[in-house]
């Protein structure tokens, strides 16, 4: 379902009720007017998507959907705590302006993560580690055959200084170039050697 949003009597934009990738797909298909989009910016999202968390991120997924459609994209996420949202927006705008000047790479999503607190700088790092863990699930209630649970999250501190998670947890904005292809190319021949058959 899509709502038209008006400001001062003028169409401002559209609100897509669906998952983040749905919104990007709808926009690229229905709002293009025959012209390609230059860039898709997904976010700014509340909640970091550094390290392995990126694989489960709706924000990164929406940016990947743009790449799937052949449009360059940026995914921007920030901490849920003490974050200067104005600084986050300004950083995102500077990145978009650089893309406007120099062009954006096709086939690459830039994943940006902005920590809370005082920012120490910017680091370009590969994704690595997982800062969110699950301690268990708390049973909130039961009704008939259905149960409702809440995840009990724990924060895991990264000790690998080469990763985006470590830099993020130490006060740096991180930039991680991501590709659409998750294939482990080194393992392909190993799986082929298994000679798996239908029977």
Image (cartoon, rainbow, N blue to C red):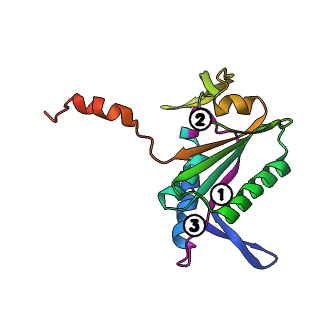
The N terminus sits in image quarter: bottom right
Relative side of 90 to 174, left or right: right
x then y, percent, for residue 138: 62, 23
Secondary structure of the residue carrying numbered label 1: strand
Spatial separation of the CA atoms under disc 1 and disc 3: 12 Å
- Residue drawn at x 55%, y 49% is 61
Nearer to the camera, 7 or 58 = 58
- Residue drawn at x 55%, y 45% is 178
Spatial separation of the CA atoms under disc 2 and disc 3: 28 Å
Q: Are marks 1 and 3 in contact (CB under 8 Å)?
A: no
**The quadrant where residue 101 appears:** bottom right
* Vertical relation: 66 (above or below) 143: below
Tag of residue 41: 1
Q: Is residue 138 visible?
A: no
Residue 44 lies in magenta, yes or no? yes
**The quadrant where residue 78 appears:** top right
Query: Which residue has dot 3 on it?
Result: 27
x then y, percent, for residue 95: 72, 55
Secondary structure of the residue carrying numbered label 2: loop
x then y, percent, for residue 134: 60, 24
Tag of residue 127: 2
Camera-side mark, 1 or 2: 2
Total residue callouts: 3
Span highlighted in magenta in the image? 31-54
Camera-side mark, 2 or 3: 2
């Amino acid at each position: 379902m899509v709502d038209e949003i008006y400001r001062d009597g003028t169409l401002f934009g559209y609100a897509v009720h669906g998952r983040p990738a749905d919104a990007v797909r709808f926009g690229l298909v229905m709002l293009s007017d025959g012209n390609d989009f230059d860039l898709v910016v997904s976010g700014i999202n509340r909640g970091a998507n550094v390290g392995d968390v990126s694989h489960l991120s709706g924000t990164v997924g929406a940016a990947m959907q743009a790449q799937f459609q052949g449009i360059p994209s940026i995914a921007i996420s920030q901490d849920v705590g003490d974050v200067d949202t104005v600084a986050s927006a300004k950083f995102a705008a500077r990145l978009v302006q650089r893309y406007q000047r120099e062009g954006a790479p096709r086939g690459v999503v830039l994943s940006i993560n902005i920590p809370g607190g005082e920012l120490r700088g910017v680091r370009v790092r590969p994704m690595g580690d997982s800062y969110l863990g699950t301690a268990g699930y708390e049973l909130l209630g039961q009704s008939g055959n259905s149960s409702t649970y809440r995840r009990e999250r724990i924060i895991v501190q990264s000790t690998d200084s080469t990763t985006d998670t470590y830099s993020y947890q130490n006060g740096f904005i991180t930039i991680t170039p991501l590709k659409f292809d998750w294939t482990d190319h080194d393992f392909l021949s190993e799986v082929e050697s298994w000679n798996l058959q239908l029977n």
